[in-house]
């Protein structure tokens, strides 16, 4: 199949907005790379009879972002034409093993330099799914190492490639339920779960809400975008056990207060805020009194 690879240069303030535009216009997801001081968001659109109108809409919406107060290094799109096989070659150039604590994330075609005690996670990127390079994902990977306990039930909301679900299982969680709204993401996550031999622990479901996860969880991780976290706040809180931990990320610094306020309004308290560059992860727990602010 032939694809149009759409590239947009972004800064921290505009990255989420550009990613959302590409997804809303038909990309299965987006991937962000940082090279020589330039951050680029990529998405892939199928080359079909809708492509011209989709690209026109993407251009119009990207060019309107400065009027909304969001800066970009450039409002122009870069378009590359790729076949499935060409995209795979490109992936092998960009994605290399990375380490976050004792977690080593590696594509299957690499042999990572693992040390004793490391947990190696093989994640092959789908057409637009990240592999742990983004700050928000790294924040979640570190938080999972700090908070997952043996036998825990973990919910991963917006699982994408399934990286966080796989890591939770390898850290000792007893049951992991991973949910994503995109069927392509679900397929990618299922493949990565099987690749890491944790299928007996991890179930991947198609869904758009924490309500799609049966029961409740000891730990819930949600690495999406602030507006979605805010909208989901009541359901995230409802799915968390009374002594559980909620990890939310995908949050730029200037939206931290919006997210913490929404979570606190539904009976959670902010126990910790972690930062990497301009990205934030919020660690929340149920308030002991269970009341609302």
Image (spheres, rainbow, N blue to C red):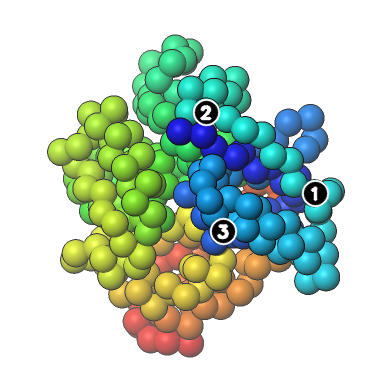
Residue 207 on image: x %, y %? 31, 62
Task: Please determine whether, in this image, residue 120 is positioned above or below residue 163.
Answer: above
Indicate which disc residue 76 carries. 1
> Which is more N-terminal, label 3 or label 1?
3
Secondary structure category for the residue under label 2: strand
Residue 287 on image: x %, y %? 39, 76
Q: In which quarter of the image is residue 111?
A: top left
Residue 188 on image: x %, y %? 36, 39
Is residue 168 or residue 243 the one in the foreground?
Answer: 168
Q: Name the residue under label 3.
A: 25
Q: Quadrant of residue 257?
A: bottom right
Indicate which disc residue 158 carries. none
**Tag in front: 3 or 2:** 2
Q: In this view, does 196 lie to the left or right of 139?
A: left
Secondary structure category for the residue under label 1: loop
Residue 179 on image: x %, y %? 32, 55
């Amino acid at each position: 199949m032939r694809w149009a690879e759409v590239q947009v240069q972004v800064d921290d303030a505009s990255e989420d907005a550009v990613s959302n535009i590409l997804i809303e216009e038909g990309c299965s997801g987006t991937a962000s790379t940082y090279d020589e001081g330039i951050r680029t968001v990529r998405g892939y659109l199928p080359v079909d009879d809708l492509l011209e109108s989709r690209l026109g809409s993407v251009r119009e919406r990207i060019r309107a972002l400065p009027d909304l107060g969001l800066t970009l290094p450039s409002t122009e799109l870069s378009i590359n034409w790729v076949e499935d096989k060409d995209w795979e070659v490109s992936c092998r150039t960009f994605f290399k093993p990375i380490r976050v604590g004792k977690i080593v994330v590696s594509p299957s075609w690499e042999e990572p330099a693992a040390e004793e005690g490391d947990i190696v996670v093989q994640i092959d990127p789908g057409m637009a799914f990240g592999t742990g390079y983004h700050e928000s994902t790294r924040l979640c990977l570190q938080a999972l190492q700090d908070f997952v306990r043996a036998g825990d039930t973990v919910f991963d909301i917006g699982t994408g490639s399934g990286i966080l679900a796989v890591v939770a299982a390898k850290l000792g969680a007893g049951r992991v339920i991973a949910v994503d709204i995109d069927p392509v993401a679900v397929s990618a996550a299922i493949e990565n779960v099987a690749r890491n031999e944790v299928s007996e622990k991890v179930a991947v479901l198609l869904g758009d809400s924490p309500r799609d996860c049966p029961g409740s969880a000891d730990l819930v991780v949600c690495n999406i975008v602030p507006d979605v976290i805010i909208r989901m706040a009541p359901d995230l809180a409802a799915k968390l056990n009374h002594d559980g931990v909620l990890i939310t990320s995908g949050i730029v610094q200037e939206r931290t207060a919006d997210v913490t306020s929404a979570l606190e309004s539904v009976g959670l308290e902010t126990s910790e805020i972690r930062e990497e560059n301009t990205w934030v992860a919020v660690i929340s727990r149920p308030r002991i009194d269970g009341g609302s602010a």
